[in-house]
Amino acid sequence: MRDASNPEVSLFAAWRPPAPLSPDSLWRSLSLFNLYRLILGGVLVFTSALFGAALSLTQHEQTAFFWVSAVFTLLVLVSVLAVVLRKPQPGWQLAFQLCVDIACISMLSYIGGVQSNLPMLLLVSLAFVGMISHGRITLLYAALASITLLLSHAYAVLTRDASESLFFQTGILSTSYFAVAWLAHALSKYALDSERLAARRGEDLSNMAEANRLMIQDMPDGMLVVDERGRVRQFNPSAGRLLGYTFSAGQEIALVECSTLLEAMYAAWRQNHELGGEVLQLPRSNRMVRVRFLEIGDRSFWGAVIVLEDMQRMQEQAQQVKLAALGRLTANIAHEVRNPLSSISYATELLQEVQSDPTQTRLLQIILDNTARLNRIVQDVMQINRRDRSQAERIALCAALPTFVDGLAQVEQVSRDVFELDLPADCTVHFDRGHFEQVLWNLCRNALRYSHKQKGSVQLRCLQDARGRQILEVEDDGPGVAEADAQSLFEPFYTTDSGGTGLGLYIARELCEANDAVIGYRRGDHGGACFSISFATADDT
């Protein structure tokens, strides 16, 4: 409960500044109010001193008017000093200032009469109180001003024979005090509510702008905001990376400085908005990007957002999809492939126990070797991303390749002369033996499939580069690979053969990378396909 014995609690407990007003703003408002009162006091003193006779006042009334105006001005100066010192609290100061206004202006009204319209000066003070005060204290001040004005006029009627008919005008003024005070309070409250709403909206917009900025900065695709003059207004780090250009913050940059090709496309798009979506190679970074234009247009800005989609990133995402599909595929076929292989291997072993001629024995051994190789292929495909499975060992190509070619010729039922070997005696590489046979099997099978199957159609030769790395080349005399297909040779599931799976070269590349080797393709010296394996040296491994 409120303590009625405490005047500060009883009079000013309802007073508090509006929430959006900071203390500095409140003191600034009081300072402006005192400035108005100081000017008003100066005008009253100046008017009473120089133009007292023109006010239709007696000599006694002129003197009283002057001294009341002087006292009012002096009390205003005291209020100014209190505001400067910021003591006491704003509620006390506001009450003191308004009581001084009510007392002094009521006394001036008594001297000059209600018909002098001096009581209307209180409307300004009450309007100010209504704007910065809160709650019922506004009506309290209006009631105090009304009572003081009515008592002043009643005293004038009793002592100075003032007209009783002026009570009506006094009542109208009193009603105006309530109306102005409450209207100013209502308008101030509405304005403050609007200010709070605008502040919330501004904060939301600021948060949204910051979120958009962070999102744009973190986007993997390049973003450029360009105006109608071709000036870059905004950019993100990905744009600089794709363009191969270093942007400077706060510096005005022309689009032509970043990329002349992009500037030409932007100029063409401004003439025809149907353009856009082309894939091009940026000259500085050699990155493949798809360029899209998004129009921006309003009263203050016209331009476009240029989106640079990184095709390499999109290809990597597609690669991940293919890898996921490969994982599902291998998981499904592993069981179906291994069971028949086990049956074939077991049946072959049983046949080997039966006495047979050497030719049959050799054929059964080929079956066993190839079932074992197929089983290894299934295991490698299932665990193709496990790089720790590679166990490199020294392989002498001059000894390993002839044996491998003999077995391949028998399996493919072609003449041994189809394969031509050019291997130095000291050609030794470091590679996992099972991986090496699988890679070589894929390359030689492809070469044999597209060759003419004549003598020397498939050539295997070992070279040495400037760094001392051994390079094994497998070349055929076939038609070669079209340029459009050359870039996709090592992608999973990509094949030009309707009967192929598109996994052979992909698995070969993965196994080479697992052994620190690099597989590549070029057109052969005779127009056919030439695949090369660049092996790691002993120091590299």
Image (cartoon, rainbow, N blue to C red):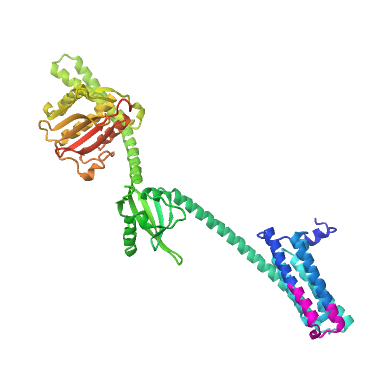
Residue 341 visible = yes
Q: Is residue 57 magenta?
A: yes
Can you say whether 274 is above or below 516 in the image?
below
Residue 295, located in which quarter of the rendered image?
bottom left
Q: Position of residue 207 (x, y in %)?
A: 53, 54
Q: Is residue 457 left or right of 274 when viewed as pictured?
A: left
Residue 268, located in which quarter of the rendered image?
bottom left
Q: Is residue 121 left or right of 326 when viewed as pictured?
A: right
Q: Nearer the viewer, residue 222 or 380?
A: 222
Residue 340 visible = no
Q: Nearer the viewer, residue 306 or 440?
A: 306
Residue drawn at x 31%, y 50% as measured from the top left:
283
Q: Position of residue 144 (x, y in %)?
A: 80, 70
Magenta: main secondary structure equals helix
Which residue ends up furthest to the left in the rendered image? 454
Can you say whether 9 is above or below 459 in the image?
below
Q: Position of residue 463 (x, y in %)?
A: 21, 30
Q: Which quadrant of the rendered structure holds the N terminus?
A: bottom right
What is the span of residues highlighted in magenta in the rendered image?
39-65
Q: Position of residue 194 (x, y in %)?
A: 61, 64
Q: Nearer the viewer, residue 321 or 491?
A: 491
Q: Is residue 236 left or right of 207 when viewed as pictured?
A: left
Q: Nearer the viewer, residue 126 or 541?
A: 541
Can you say whether 500 is above or below 274 in the image?
above
Q: Which quadrant of the rendered structure holds the C terminus?
A: top left
